[in-house]
Amino acid sequence: MYGKQLRLKRIFPGDRRLFSVPLDHSVSMGPIDGLEETPALVAELVRAGVDLVIVTKGAVRGLVPVLTPRTLLGIHMSASTSLNPNSNRKVLAGTAEEAIALGADLLSVQVNFGIPEEGEMLRDLGIAADQCRAVGLPLLCMAYVKKANGGTPDELRHACRAAADLGADIVKTSYPGSLEEYRRLVRTTPAPLLLGGGNRLDDDQAFLALVRETVTAGAAGICIGRNLFQRRPVETFAKQVAAILHGSG
């Protein structure tokens, strides 16, 4: 119990928003642009001021030399690949005990709502929640609505509330479409809410405006991958994002 509380205090110190970057795409999508050499990318992100990186368990071995004592580590334990025609069906590929042994500050799982296998992923979320409770590890749920429109604001609120009510300590989801809906989503999710990247925003200023909206809406921070690490130069741009989230920009 105390272990989870202490870890959550380190993740959310209270004076700034969380800057987290998921780098688990190499399992689901392969070594895509930006993830050809994960350690080099993480070194840039750390220098830029990223608080938390989320990786797969096998990727940790390459990151030990570049992670600093202040860098938080998340282990993503949901897996599927685009080689499977049913790639939206995620399965648990590890345990909270494994994550602790790897030095994790949190465990991450994904639930894709709105598909026939949703119930199986909710069961996995429950299993992960029980494991995390037993070892004092915070649980992040990446909650997505897998429909053609990416989910209406009502559907996103439902998914986030379900994730929190089933034991997630932190919830990540997609942008709900407007600042008003964003604020409503934050209010109705009884856990810290992180904004996911969603569709690619090619315009840098539009992306930075979305980060500022995260602060305005009262969200706990961002958890954005390709929309961030596929920009060049990564370190320079990430420093601008960090300044917004940490209250200096």
Image (spheres, rainbow, N blue to C red):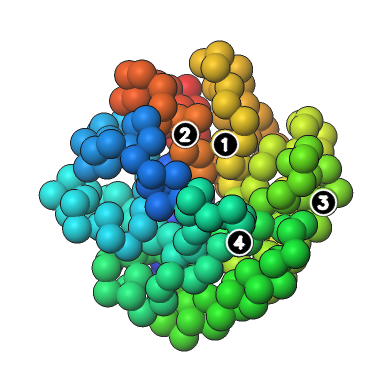
Label placed on residue 22:
none
Q: Nearer the viewer, residue 109 or 211?
A: 109
The residue that disc 2 covers is: 226
CB of mark 1 within 8 Å of CB of mark 2? yes
Question: Distance between the Cα atoms at labels 4 and 3?
Answer: 19 Å
Q: Position of residue 148 (x, y in %)?
A: 77, 40
Label placed on residue 197:
1
Q: Residue at x 27, y 50 (%)?
A: 70
Question: Distance between the Cα atoms at labels 2 and 3?
Answer: 24 Å
Tell me if mark 4 has few (under 14), some (14-19) or many (20+) residues whose alpha carbon lies within 10 angstroms of its own.
Answer: many
Q: Can residue 18 be spotted in the picture?
A: no
Q: Secondary structure at mark 2?
A: helix
Label placed on residue 155:
3
The residue that disc 4 covers is: 89
Q: Secondary structure at mark 3?
A: helix
Q: Can residue 79 be spotted in the picture?
A: yes
Q: Residue at x 36, y 79 (%)?
A: 97
Question: Distance between the Cα atoms at labels 1 and 2?
Answer: 7 Å
Q: Mark 2 vs mark 4: which is more N-terminal?
A: 4
